[in-house]
Image (tube, helix red, strand yellow):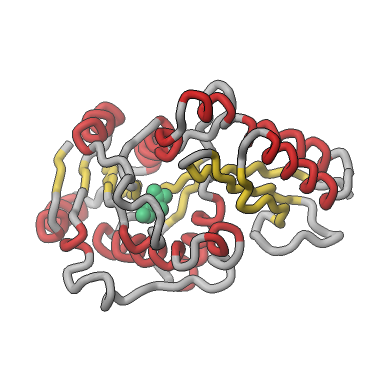
């Protein structure tokens, strides 16, 4: 696996791939890789000849007071894992390479509608940062497909709309959430948890499972969500949101069958997110 740090080297390597008429898959990440990221690489491997992973802790998607400085940077460990997972090219630029004129004057991409509410409500500007950096990476790599985790459900919806609206000829592949044995969705931010918080953390998943079962059994959403919020608070979480939406993130109506339960909650220093899809009874 080659690691490239600048745009001309990336373009040169990819020109050679395109001359061989090979299919390119892109896996954008912020590094500190875990099995969830490796599942993205495996999925990319299955769909393409050449897998390009990017590692870039994107300052534009972090708000003031968020964990940009603390975000774990583990390039050497990440390189070893990517190599073992069969990644062909790692693109790991610094901020100056991607935003050479500085963040303040950087052209931005905003995806209206799906970026609003949920994580977009509690992290203003977050999805503008995600949409901007993903557009830059799509433009630089010009992959045939790109893989994103379903844990970041809203992010996946934002990227699907971005691709449709900007006519990127790229297939977006959603990859199922990878969980620890106790149900906790894998996330780089789980590393912020103390031992006691890590023990409490799977309560987020268990609470979503209980709420999903109740909703699928026909219980009314409002009390189910209220009870789930109480259960999370009792377990030491500070819920950010706990919402039932249609799978396209629109509101649930009497006609909605395919729905998704989404949650974000703080536990100690970590903000955890998770979601479960479900079928509402008719
Ligand atoms: O999901 C992530 O790790 C990031 O939001 C992404 C898609 C790599 C953009 O920085």
In the image: residue 59, left or right of residue 119: left
- Extreme residue toward the top, this view: 181
Q: Position of residue 162 (x, y in %)?
A: 46, 67
Quadrant occupied by the N terminus:
top left
In the image: residue 16, left or right of residue 179: left
Residue 202 visible in image = yes
Residue at horizontal 77%, vertical 47%? 225
Residue 146 visible in image = no
Q: Position of residue 16 (x, y in %)?
A: 14, 52
Q: Is residue 275 above or below residue 234?
A: below
In the image: residue 5, left or right of residue 42: left
Q: Position of residue 56 (x, y in %)?
A: 27, 51
Residue at horizontal 51%, vertical 62%? 158
Is 18 in front, or is 242?
Answer: 242
Is 11 in front, or is 3?
Answer: 3
Residue at horizontal 47%, vertical 60%? 159
């Amino acid at each position: 696996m080659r690691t490239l740090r600048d745009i001309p080297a990336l373009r040169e390597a990819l020109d050679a791939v395109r001359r061989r008429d090979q299919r390119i898959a892109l896996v954008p990440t912020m590094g500190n890789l875990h099995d969830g990221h490796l599942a993205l690489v495996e999925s990319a491997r299955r769909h393409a000849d050449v897998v390009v992973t990017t590692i870039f802790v994107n300052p534009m998607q972090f708000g003031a007071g968020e964990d940009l400085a603390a975000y774990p940077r583990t390039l050497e460990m990440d390189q070893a894992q990517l190599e073992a997972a069969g990644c062909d090219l790692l693109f790991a630029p610094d901020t100056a390479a991607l935003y050479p004129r500085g963040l303040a004057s950087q052209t931005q991409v905003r995806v209206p509608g799906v970026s609003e509410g949920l994580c977009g409500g509690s992290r203003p500007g977050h999805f503008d940062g995600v949409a901007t950096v993903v557009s830059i990476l799509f433009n630089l790599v010009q992959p045939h497909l790109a893989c994103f985790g379903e844990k970041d459900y809203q992010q996946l919806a934002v990227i699907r709309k971005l691709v449709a609206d900007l006519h990127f000829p790229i297939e977006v592949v959603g990859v199922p959430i990878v969980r620890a044995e106790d149900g906790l969705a894998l996330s780089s931010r789980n590393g912020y948890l103390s031992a006691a918080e890590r023990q409490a953390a799977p309560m987020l998943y268990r609470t979503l499972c209980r709420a999903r079962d109740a909703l699928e059994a026909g219980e009314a959403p409002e009390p189910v969500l209220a009870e789930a919020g109480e259960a999370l608070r009792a377990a030491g979480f500070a819920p950010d949101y706990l919402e039932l939406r249609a799978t396209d993130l629109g509101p649930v109506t009497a006609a909605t069958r395919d729905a998704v339960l989404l949650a974000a909650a703080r536990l100690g220093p970590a903000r955890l997110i998770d979601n479960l899809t479900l079928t509402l009874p008719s």
